[in-house]
Image: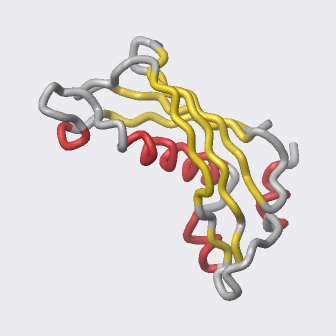
Amino acid sequence: MKSSSTKTRIRYSETDQMGVVYHGNYAQFFELGRTEWLRSLGVTYKDMEFNGIMLPVISINFNFVQSALYDDVLTIKTFLKKKPMVKIEFDYEITNQNNELICTGSSVLAFMNSKTMKPTRCPDYLLKGLEY
Protein backbone atom coordinates (compact mmCIF):
# COMPACT_ATOMS: atom_id res chain seq x y z
CA MET A 1 0.00 0.00 0.00
CA LYS A 2 0.93 3.67 -0.18
CA SER A 3 3.89 4.82 1.91
CA SER A 4 5.81 8.04 2.50
CA SER A 5 9.01 9.18 4.14
CA THR A 6 9.93 12.40 5.96
CA LYS A 7 12.91 13.63 7.95
CA THR A 8 13.25 15.56 11.19
CA ARG A 9 16.24 16.70 13.24
CA ILE A 10 16.12 16.12 17.00
CA ARG A 11 15.98 19.41 18.88
CA TYR A 12 17.49 19.88 22.32
CA SER A 13 14.02 20.40 23.83
CA GLU A 14 13.02 16.87 22.74
CA THR A 15 15.74 15.25 24.87
CA ASP A 16 16.42 14.59 28.52
CA GLN A 17 19.55 15.63 30.41
CA MET A 18 21.49 12.74 28.83
CA GLY A 19 20.66 13.92 25.29
CA VAL A 20 18.27 10.99 24.72
CA VAL A 21 14.90 11.62 23.07
CA TYR A 22 12.04 11.44 25.59
CA HIS A 23 9.82 8.46 24.74
CA GLY A 24 6.64 10.57 24.65
CA ASN A 25 7.95 12.45 21.62
CA TYR A 26 7.61 9.37 19.42
CA ALA A 27 3.84 9.94 19.23
CA GLN A 28 4.62 13.30 17.65
CA PHE A 29 7.06 11.67 15.21
CA PHE A 30 4.32 9.24 14.16
CA GLU A 31 1.92 12.17 13.75
CA LEU A 32 4.48 13.95 11.57
CA GLY A 33 4.70 10.80 9.46
CA ARG A 34 0.90 10.62 9.11
CA THR A 35 0.46 14.28 8.20
CA GLU A 36 3.16 14.05 5.54
CA TRP A 37 1.65 10.79 4.28
CA LEU A 38 -1.68 12.60 3.83
CA ARG A 39 0.05 15.58 2.23
CA SER A 40 1.65 13.21 -0.32
CA LEU A 41 -1.93 12.44 -1.43
CA GLY A 42 -2.81 16.14 -1.66
CA VAL A 43 -4.83 16.07 1.59
CA THR A 44 -4.20 17.86 4.90
CA TYR A 45 -5.74 17.51 8.35
CA LYS A 46 -6.93 21.10 7.91
CA ASP A 47 -8.78 20.11 4.70
CA MET A 48 -10.37 17.14 6.42
CA GLU A 49 -11.49 19.19 9.41
CA PHE A 50 -12.91 21.86 7.10
CA ASN A 51 -14.94 19.06 5.46
CA GLY A 52 -16.24 17.82 8.83
CA ILE A 53 -13.89 14.87 9.35
CA MET A 54 -11.74 14.31 12.44
CA LEU A 55 -9.17 11.55 12.89
CA PRO A 56 -8.70 10.68 16.57
CA VAL A 57 -6.07 8.09 17.46
CA ILE A 58 -7.73 5.04 19.00
CA SER A 59 -4.59 2.96 19.52
CA ILE A 60 -0.86 3.42 19.24
CA ASN A 61 2.05 1.04 19.72
CA PHE A 62 5.81 1.66 20.01
CA ASN A 63 8.70 -0.80 19.85
CA PHE A 64 11.93 0.91 20.88
CA VAL A 65 15.12 -0.60 19.44
CA GLN A 66 17.72 1.99 20.42
CA SER A 67 17.81 5.61 21.58
CA ALA A 68 17.61 8.60 19.30
CA LEU A 69 19.93 11.40 20.42
CA TYR A 70 20.14 15.17 20.25
CA ASP A 71 20.94 16.41 16.71
CA ASP A 72 20.21 13.02 15.07
CA VAL A 73 18.38 13.23 11.76
CA LEU A 74 15.52 10.76 11.83
CA THR A 75 13.72 9.35 8.83
CA ILE A 76 10.10 8.47 9.57
CA LYS A 77 8.66 5.95 7.13
CA THR A 78 4.89 5.65 7.23
CA PHE A 79 3.06 2.73 5.63
CA LEU A 80 -0.68 2.33 5.10
CA LYS A 81 -1.56 -1.21 6.25
CA LYS A 82 -4.74 -1.70 4.22
CA LYS A 83 -7.49 0.18 2.43
CA PRO A 84 -9.20 2.46 4.97
CA MET A 85 -12.87 2.04 5.77
CA VAL A 86 -14.05 3.55 9.08
CA LYS A 87 -10.55 3.12 10.50
CA ILE A 88 -7.17 3.85 9.00
CA GLU A 89 -4.14 1.83 10.11
CA PHE A 90 -0.46 2.74 9.77
CA ASP A 91 2.89 1.08 10.44
CA TYR A 92 6.00 3.17 11.12
CA GLU A 93 9.74 2.69 10.95
CA ILE A 94 12.13 5.31 12.30
CA THR A 95 15.84 5.21 11.43
CA ASN A 96 18.69 7.60 12.17
CA GLN A 97 21.19 9.22 9.78
CA ASN A 98 23.28 6.02 9.87
CA ASN A 99 20.24 4.00 8.75
CA GLU A 100 20.10 2.31 12.16
CA LEU A 101 16.64 1.25 13.30
CA ILE A 102 15.44 3.37 16.24
CA CYS A 103 11.76 2.51 16.60
CA THR A 104 8.90 0.71 14.92
CA GLY A 105 5.23 0.97 15.70
CA SER A 106 1.67 1.24 14.54
CA SER A 107 -1.42 3.34 15.03
CA VAL A 108 -5.12 3.10 14.33
CA LEU A 109 -7.27 6.18 13.80
CA ALA A 110 -11.01 6.44 13.29
CA PHE A 111 -12.81 8.71 10.84
CA MET A 112 -15.34 10.76 12.82
CA ASN A 113 -18.02 13.19 11.71
CA SER A 114 -17.24 16.40 13.62
CA LYS A 115 -20.93 17.38 13.90
CA THR A 116 -22.37 14.08 15.10
CA MET A 117 -19.18 12.83 16.81
CA LYS A 118 -19.93 9.40 15.34
CA PRO A 119 -17.76 7.16 13.19
CA THR A 120 -18.03 7.64 9.45
CA ARG A 121 -16.54 6.12 6.32
CA CYS A 122 -13.24 7.21 4.84
CA PRO A 123 -13.86 10.22 2.58
CA ASP A 124 -14.00 9.50 -1.15
CA TYR A 125 -11.32 12.12 -1.92
CA LEU A 126 -8.86 10.20 0.26
CA LEU A 127 -9.75 6.87 -1.37
CA LYS A 128 -9.27 8.45 -4.81
CA GLY A 129 -5.81 9.61 -3.77
CA LEU A 130 -4.91 6.00 -2.98
CA GLU A 131 -5.72 4.78 -6.49
CA TYR A 132 -2.63 3.98 -8.52
Query: In the rendered image of this protein, does residue 113 appear above or below residue 7?
Result: below
For this view, does 112 lie left or right of residue 123?
left
Nearest the viewer among 81 and 5 is 81
Query: In the rendered image of this protein, does residue 96 appear above or below residue 76?
Result: above
For this view, does 28 lie left or right of residue 107?
left
Residue at 87% across / 42% down in the picture? 132
Task: List x then y, in percent, for residue 92.
Answer: 59, 33
Q: How is the image coloured?
A: secondary structure
Residue at the left extreme, as displayed: 17
Residue at 47% across / 22% down in the picture? 95
Task: Kindly indicate the quadrant of the structure image that contains residue 73.
Answer: top left
Task: List x then y, in percent, for residue 98.
Answer: 40, 12
Task: List x then y, in percent, for residue 107.
Answer: 62, 45
For this view, does 52 lie left or right of residue 123?
left
Task: Kindly indicate the quadrant of the structure image that contains residue 27.
Answer: top left
Residue at 87% across / 48% down in the picture? 131
Residue at 71% across / 46% down in the picture? 89
So how many labels did they put on this image? 0
Query: In the rendered image of this protein, does residue 70 appear above or below residue 86?
Result: above
Image quadrant in which the N terminus is located: top right
Nearest the viewer among 99 and 64 is 64
Task: List x then y, in percent, for residue 94.
Answer: 49, 27
